[in-house]
Image (cartoon, coloured by chain):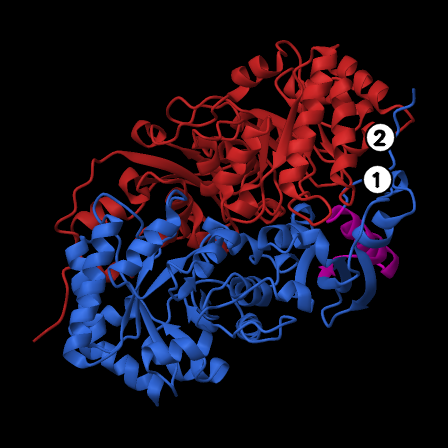
Chain colours: A blue, B red
C-alpha cells in the first residue's frame, strides 16, 4: 500500500483577505532578489519543498505572494509580500512568526514595514490610553510629557520612594522604576511599588499635580497579571514592560487585561540585536514604533540619536512615524519616548524632531547639582517653552 | 532646603556571591577594550553616571566588575565580568536583562558565555526530563532520536493527524507540529492536538512503539498554562515553544508547571537576529545551548550547518557543548536537535558531530518518494547504524 498524502490543501477555505510585509534584501541582481523573496514567501508559511506541494489551495492561498520588488535609495532591493490573514490566527505571536520567525536567521534581510488589513487590525485593540488618554491623565495638553527613572539599582525601597517623592514635587509626569529594578532582595517588588505609589500620591496632594509612578513588571512570568493587578490596587500609575524580555504577546496581554487597565511603557531592553546592524533584523520604525503599539503600549522608549547608542536622527523620525501611522484599522497613536543619556541642554533639539508629541526621558542628568527638585522644575520649564 | 540624596547604597546588603559573563568586544586597542568593558559593567547594572555615585556599597557590589580582558583567536577582545547574584533577583528575565538588556543595542559586542554561581544555579530546575528522561520515554537508549514535523500549513486537522499516524507507524520518536501551526481557523488548536495525539496513540498500539506527538504552543499569551494542561489531558507527548516569540521566562514557566510536566522542545523562530552577525548578539552556544536549557527545555532545535541558514560546524559544536556543559550547579543536559533542510543522505555526517546524543529533525525530505512509512523506516535504520 502506498502511503502518499494529498498535500494540496483540498479542504482549505480562506477569506482571500491578505496583509502586507516589506523586506529589504541584500542581493546583487534583480534575479537574485526575486529568488530570495520567493524563498521568504515559502519559509515564512509552509516551510516545505515547493516541488512536493501539488497545485491547489495551499499554493494559491497559504504560500506568501511576492508582489513587487524595487530598489531603495541605498541600493537595497525591497520586496513587498502578502500573506493570507488566516495564517496568523489573529494573534501577535503567530503574526510575528509569519513576518520573521525563521527568516530572522538569514543574513542580509531586514523587515521594513507591515500593513495590516482591516480584519487583522480589528484583532488588536492597541493602546488603551494612547496620546490623548495620557494627556488627560497627566493634565498636560500642550507640551511634551516628562519622564525620569528612580535609580541607581542598589538603593533601598525607602530611598527609591524618597526620590520618587522629590521627582513628583519637581513636576515630572511619569516617574518610572529603572528597568533593572525587578524583585531583588534589597528592593522587593510589592513593598517598593506600594511605597513609591504612596510617595507620589503624597507629593501630588501637596502640589495639586498629577504625577504617576510607573512600576517595572519585566521579570518572572508566573503570576504576572496578578502582580500587575496588585500594582494597580496600591495606586501605581502605569507599568514598564520590555517586549524583548517578556515577549510581545505577554505585554499585549497585560495591556488588554481589564483588571490592570494601566498605561504601558515599552522598554527596549534585549531588543537591540534586531537593529544593531542596518542590513538585518527589523527596521527601527517597525520594532520600536508600530510593534509595541500593536501590543497595546501607550509609550515606547528608545535611544535618541547622539547618545551612547548608535541610533540616527532618521531612525528616531521613523520611530515617531511608527507611533502614529495608519496600521490598517484604527489603533490609537502612542507616544515616542526618546531616552539614553539625554540631558537638559538637548531639549530644544529634541523638540525639533518630535514637537510636543513625545515623552522626554532624562535620567542621571537630573541628579547634577545639589537641588534635585529645582532641576526637575528647570526640565519642566524647558519642555514647556 | 537642599534636595540631594545619598546614592551610595548605605542600606545595601549582599552576599558577596557573584556570577560571570564574558563579552567579545570590537576594539582597536586594549585601552579601548577596557573602556568598553567598564561601560558595559555600568550600563548593565546601575545605568547611571558613575561620577554621581559616591563611594559605598553600590560601587563596591552592584556595578559589574571587569576581571580580565584577553584577545581571542580571531583578534577580538574578550572581557570577563562578574555581577552580584542579587542583581538578578534569581529570575531568568532579570538575568537576561543583566546579561544583555541595554547592551544589546551596542554595536560590536557579543555575549560569549555565562557561568552561574551555585546559589544562582539553584534557582533553575532545568529540563524536567533531559537526555536520560527522554531516552526512557521513547525507549531509545543507544541511538539518536528521530523527529519530524506535520506540515505544510494549510492542511486540515484530519490530514495532519493522518500524517502523524503514518510517521508513528514509520517509527519516528517525536512527531511535532510545524512551528507555523498555531490556532488558525483551518487547523484549530484544541481539535488538532486531540486528533493528532489520538492518531499517534493508535499507531503505537499497532506497533508497540512509543512515538510522541508534540504540540506547538507558541501563540497567544492568554491561558497558556491552561492550554498546555489541556494538551496533556488529551495525550499530547510534549510541547514546542519558541523562546524568541514567547520570552524565555514564559517557556520556563511552562516547563516548571506541575500541571503540564511535558517535555519541552525549544524552537529558534525569531531568535535569528541574535546570531546572524558574528560580532553582535549572543554566541550560538549560549543562545541555543545554555539558555533554552536554563529555561527548562529538554530539546533545542537549531539550523545545522550546510543547510539554508548560515550556521557553521563550529556553531553546531558550540551548541552541542552548551546542551551539556556545567552551568554552575546541577542542570540536566538537554538534547541538541539539528534541523533546517536536512535529508537522509546527511545522517552519517550529522552523527560525526553529535554522536548518538541528538534529536535529528528531518521535515520535507521524508515526503520524497511514494511511501512515507517506508521512508521513515529508512530514516530509523540510518540513525541506528
Looking at the rendering, the stretch of residues picked out in magenta corresponds to: A23-45
**Rendering coords of residue A263 (x, y %):** 39, 66
Residue at the image position 37 percent from the left and 24 percent from the top: B329
**Residue located beneath label 2 in the image:** B367
The rendered magenta stretch, by its main secondary structure, is classed as helix
Circle 2/circle 1 CB separation < 8 Å: yes
Give B175 or A321, whichever is nearer the viewer: B175
Circle 1: is it few (<14), some (14-19), or many (20+) Cα within 10 Å? Answer: some
Residue occupying the far left of the picture: B1
Callout 2 and callout 1 share a chain: no
Residue at mark 1: chain = A
At a point 40% along the width and 40% down the height, the residue shown is B92
Q: Position of residue A62 (x, y in %)?
A: 79, 51
Residue behind mark 1: A49
- Nearest the viewer among A281 and A95 is A95
Q: Is residue B223 magenta?
A: no
> Which numbered dot is residue B152?
none
Amino acid at each position: 500500500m502506498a502511503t502518499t498524502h494529498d498535500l494540496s490543501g483540498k479542504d482549505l477555505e480562506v477569506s482571500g483577505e491578505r496583509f502586507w510585509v516589506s523586506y529589504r534584501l541584500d542581493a546583487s541582481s534583480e534575479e537574485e532578489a526575486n529568488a530570495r523573496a520567493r524563498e521568504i514567501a515559502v519559509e515564512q508559511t509552509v516551510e516545505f519543498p515547493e516541488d512536493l506541494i501539488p497545485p491547489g489551495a495551499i499554493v494559491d492561498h497559504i504560500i506568501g505572494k511576492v508582489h513587487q520588488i524595487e530598489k531603495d535609495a541605498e541600493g537595497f532591493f525591497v520586496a513587498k509580500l502578502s500573506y493570507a490573514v488566516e495564517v496568523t490566527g489573529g494573534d501577535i505571536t503567530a503574526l510575528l512568526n509569519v513576518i520573521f520567525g525563521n527568516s530572522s536567521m538569514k543574513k542580509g534581510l531586514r523587515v521594513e514595514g507591515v500593513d495590516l488589513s482591516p480584519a487583522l487590525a480589528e484583532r488588536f485593540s492597541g493602546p488603551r490610553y494612547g496620546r490623548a488618554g495620557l494627556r488627560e491623565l497627566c493634565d498636560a495638553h500642550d507640551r511634551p510629557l516628562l519622564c525620569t527613572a528612580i535609580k541607581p539599582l542598589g538603593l533601598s525601597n525607602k530611598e527609591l520612594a524618597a526620590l520618587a517623592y522629590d521627582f513628583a514635587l519637581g513636576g515630572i509626569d511619569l516617574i518610572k522604576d529603572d528597568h533593572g529594578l525587578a524583585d531583588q532582595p534589597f528592593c522587593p517588588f510589592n513593598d517598593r511599588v506600594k511605597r513609591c505609589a504612596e510617595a507620589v500620591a503624597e507629593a501630588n496632594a501637596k502640589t495639586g499635580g498629577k504625577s504617576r509612578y510607573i512600576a517595572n513588571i519585566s521579570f518572572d512570568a508566573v503570576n504576572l497579571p496578578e502582580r500587575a493587578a496588585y500594582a494597580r490596587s496600591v495606586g501605581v500609575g502605569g507599568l514598564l514592560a520590555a517586549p524583548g524580555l517578556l515577549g510581545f504577546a505577554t505585554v499585549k496581554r497585560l495591556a488588554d487585561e481589564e483588571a490592570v487597565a494601566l498605561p504601558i511603557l515599552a522598554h527596549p531592553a534585549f531588543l537591540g540585536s534586531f537593529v544593531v546592524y542596518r542590513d538585518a533584523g527589523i527596521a527601527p520604525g517597525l520594532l520600536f514604533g508600530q510593534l509595541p503599539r500593536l501590543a497595546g503600549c501607550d509609550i515606547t522608549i528608545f535611544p535618541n540619536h547622539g547618545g551612547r547608542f548608535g541610533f540616527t536622527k532618521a531612525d528616531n523620525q521613523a520611530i515617531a512615524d511608527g507611533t502614529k501611522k495608519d496600521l490598517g484599522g484604527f489603533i490609537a497613536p502612542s507616544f515616542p519616548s526618546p531616552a539614553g543619556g539625554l540631558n537638559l541642554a538637548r531639549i530644544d533639539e529634541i523638540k525639533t524632531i518630535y514637537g510636543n508629541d513625545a515623552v522626554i526621558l532624562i535620567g542621571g542628568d537630573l541628579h547634577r547639582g545639589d537641588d534635585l527638585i529645582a532641576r526637575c522644575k528647570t526640565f519642566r520649564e524647558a519642555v514647556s517653552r
